[in-house]
Image: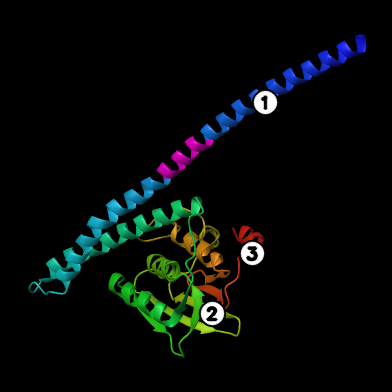
Amino acid sequence: MAWCTAALCAAVLAVIVCSALLFHYRRSLQRTRGELARLRTFHEERMRRPNVLSHELRTPLTVVRGAAELLLDESAGPLNPDQKRFIQTIAENSNQVIDMASDLLAEASLESDLFNLRLEWTEMRQLVRECVAQLRRVHNASIRLDNHGAPLRIQVDPRLMGQAVTNVVNNAARHAGEGVSILVRITESEETVTISVSDNGTGMTPEDRALLFTPFATGGSRRPGTGLGMMITQRIVELHGGKVLVDTISRKGTTVFLTLPRTWREPDHKEAMTSE
């Protein structure tokens, strides 16, 4: 009889302990869910702010840039040299701030893994041709294009790849020095397509080369920037399963190679981590 009483007490005690543990688990689960909801709200708000800021900066500046370009075309009447110089300054500085806003938005997206590839079969020669045409309107540097050959279609995200090419040319124009000549070229092999951007400028010191893909490091830039462009470019190319290589000699110039696979493949995360 005693053993039955003991067994019954043990069972009751077990039920009490299990109930207490279950209650504690439910309270912990509720707290965890509340914390996750709070973190999700914080994260969404954190990501919303760069988008709003970028939009609020770019929209009026795009209008200012457009008005300046119309004036420079002299469609509203002839300009004297001083007026043309002032308006050119307005246009150039508007472009710089627009680029900064785009870089900051892209950097926020990178931090939160919000870069999602929207792959399309893209004619790469046309994509690069359009990028160069736009950049020629922005920079005083001579930008040449070696883009002869049959149409070259591969799967990329055209918006992101356009941004990558633009970033590399902007970097060359900002760092290479006055009177620089920039050459953009597309080459292909059986397995890869390579976009190279070469300049005959001052090249990079070992210190600048080491900081090239470091966020907010502007090296020897002669013009303002965020220092994010090349880091963003590297990430975009790696998302496409490609690589960014740099060949530079101080006072001799620099060539940046964006090499992409003809057939898209998942990026090698270990390799990407090593390159960072």
Cα distance in 3D space between marks 2 and 1? 59 Å
Element carrying mark 3: loop
- Residue density around tag 1, few if under 14, some if 14–19, many if 20 or more, within 10 Å: few
Image point (68%, 20%), residue name: 20
Image x and y of residue 156, in percent: 49, 72
- Residue density around tag 3, few if under 14, some if 14–19, many if 20 or more, within 10 Å: few
Q: What residue sits right under mark 3 in the picture?
A: 268
Foreground pick, 145 / 50: 50
Type of amino acid at the residue the image marks with label 3? Asp
Image x and y of residue 142, in percent: 34, 78
Image point (46%, 58%), residue name: 219
Cα distance in 3D space between marks 3 and 1? 43 Å
Mark 2 / mark 1, whichever is N-terminal: 1
From where the camera sits, is residue 65 visible? yes
From where the camera sits, is residue 224 visible? no
Give the left or right position of residue 77, taking residue 117 as reference: left
Give the left or right position of residue 45, taking residue 137 as reference: right
Foreground pick, 157 / 201: 157
Q: What residue sits right under mark 2 in the picture?
A: 193
Q: Is residue 244 magenta?
A: no
Is 224 located above or below residue 32 in the figure? below
Tell me the magenta residue range.
Answer: 36-46
Type of amino acid at the residue the image marks with label 1? Leu
Q: Quadrant of the C terminus?
A: bottom right
Determine which quarter of the picture holds residue 267.
bottom right
Q: What residue sits right under mark 1 in the picture?
A: 22
Circles 2 and 1, Cβ within 8 Å, touching? The answer is no
